Amino acid sequence: MPILGAVALLIQLCFAYHALKTGRRWWIFVIMAFPVMGCVLYYFIEVFPSSREGRDARKAARAIARALDPDKGLRERVADLEACGSVDNRVQLARECMEQRLYSDAAALYKSCLSGVYETDPDMRFGLASALLLNGELGEALNCAQRLRASHPGYRSADLGLMIARSLEGLERLDDALKEFGVLADTYPGEEGRWRYGALLKRLGRADAAQDVFRRMLRNAERLPQHYREAQKDWLDLARESVNA
């Protein structure tokens, strides 16, 4: 029993220290006054929602809800737009269309927003370029993305660069695409830019250079935290397959 009491006190102190460190001072009184229940409440109210497990749980819940009623979100956004044709409601419906892979509808909605005070809005233009790219309208997507880069040089530069590079590759402008991917290989905050650079090198017959890129991806990932490797698993698996092929 004394050992259990000591363990319980240690757990209390750990939670109290976490509450103090994160600025949740009033929780300290709850934790110390109710040793077990206070710690349990603090964990599930304050710690769990922002943890990886909490994020995974929310993601699973959304996946289950979408599987049970895949069109619910779309119906709700359509109803909102019918009730009020505001720009915000059109954007929300466009985003839902992107989730449902209705890229042509999403592009049309984004285009309808690009007028008045929103004519040069970078978020709207980025959404439009994304929808056009995923809908296979590569020339228009490239034009939209390049104009956005020219007018807003600091806006989502890595994502915009990836969009431009993918459009160029789809249009068979491979040398231009390779230059864009080459920049992304060193600057993109994830492995997609590096993998696409290696894949294009391989497509161009530069197998040794491609292998160097894939091996560098795997080496660098080993030095990074586990949560990063989990988030980038798909691209790292592709690199591993390419190295082992």
Image: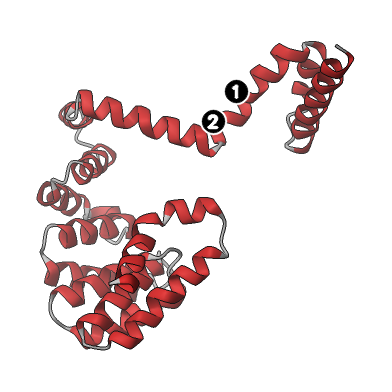
Cα separation between marks 2 and 1: 7 Å
Frontmost residue, 10 versus 121? 10
Image spot of residue 43 (x, y percent): 64, 25
Residue at numbered disc 1? 45
Q: Is residue 161 visible?
A: no
Image spot of residue 2 (x, y percent): 89, 14
What is the count of numbered marks? Answer: 2
Identified at 79% across, 23% down, the residue is 12
Q: Are marks 2 and 1 in contact (CB under 8 Å)?
A: yes
Residue at numbered disc 2? 49
Position of residue 213 in the picture relative to residue 203 (left or right): right
Q: Residue furthest right?
A: 2
Identified at 27% across, 67% down, the residue is 163
- Quadrant, the C terminus: bottom left
Secondary-structure class at tag 2: helix
Frontmost residue, 168 versus 230? 230
Q: Residue furthest front?
A: 244
Q: Is residue 29 visible?
A: yes
